[in-house]
Image: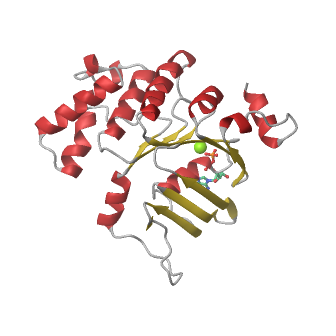
Amino acid sequence: MISISALHKYFGSNHVLNNINLEIQDGEVVVIIGPSGSGKSTLLRCINYLETFTQGSIRIHGEEVGPQSQDGKMTRLDEKRLNALRQGLGMVFQGFNLFPHKSVLDNIMMAPIDLQHLSRTEAKTRAMKLLQQVDLQDKAEAMPASLSGGQKQRIAIARALAMEPQVMLFDEPTSALDPEMVGEVLKVMEKLAKTGMTMIVVTHEMNFARHIADKVCFMEHGQIIDSGAPEDIFSRSNDSRVGKFVNKLE
Ligand code: ADP
Ligand code: MG
């Protein structure tokens, strides 16, 4: 479904992504772990076309989304194509980014109405189903400010799902939460994984990685320096780099 090869990204002279190669199959859950500054967010942002990259290729369903055309000249996808690609990718960030002056329901209904031209009735039916999926049906009319951090993040997930994306990208979705709210968000993500959603998740939640991931990638200095099934990654010795990283967190 997603195929990344020989991907490089520079910010000025900072080599932020250094030869990333990654294949993600339909329905797979890939967890990316690694220290702060290793390039995890930048990688997600390249996949989502929020960032251009310097060299290499990212294909989604065989379609090149990269900034380079075949003759090597920098190109930009036209706006329409770009929007279509982005709509196939749902993204959930660390912060909640809900529209504060809109109700929960309107937050979820907005993109399907504006971008997919659903009627209000259709959008509402879809939104109510999603609220049920994240177990917050009773918050449809609530305003974001009245919700807890965990509830906001579950709404943010529902809102991303409202566009019926083929892939969901999560960038440290629980890092800004009070510890007692982490579990409810991970539970929603676990449920989503079990529906067969293709997911790329950047997280420091090692238990989630251990139990839900099909594949774990360990990034350092812009490179994936280790990857494999969770049972392999988490049984690396204490003096391997990934072993050291995991032990520090647990
Ligand atoms: P991570 O998510 O793993 O913490 P990031 O992808 O955020 O890492 O950052 C990787 C590197 O890229 C860091 O050195 C960071 O300072 C740099 N970086 C990230 N975003 C920008 C930007 N917009 N402009 C310049 N440098 C950036
Ligand atoms: Mg980050």
Q: Quadrant of residue 99?
A: top left
Residue with the most extreme right position: 239
* Quadrant of the displayed image that contains ligand 2: top right
Percent position of residue 152, x then y: 39, 26
Query: Can you see residue 90?
Result: yes
Residue with the most extreme bottom position: 71
Q: Is residue 179 above or below residue 107?
A: above
Q: Is residue 104 above or below residue 172?
A: above
Is 42 displayed left or right of 194 in the figure?
Answer: right
Q: Residue at x 45, y 59 (%)?
A: 49
Q: Is residue 210 above or below residue 163?
A: above
Q: Quadrant of residue 81?
A: bottom left
Q: Is residue 193 above or below residue 180?
A: below
Is 175 displayed left or right of 104 in the figure?
Answer: right
Q: Residue at x 74, y 32 (%)?
A: 246
Is 9 displayed left or right of 48 in the figure?
Answer: right
Q: Residue at x 42, y 71 (%)?
A: 76
Query: Can you see residue 102?
Result: no
Q: Nearer the viewer, residue 90 or 212?
A: 212
Percent position of residue 110, x then y: 23, 41
Q: Nearer the viewer, residue 244 or 42?
A: 244
Q: Quadrant of the C terminus?
A: top right
Percent position of residue 227, x then y: 69, 47
Number of numbered callouts drawn = 0
Percent position of residue 223, x then y: 70, 55
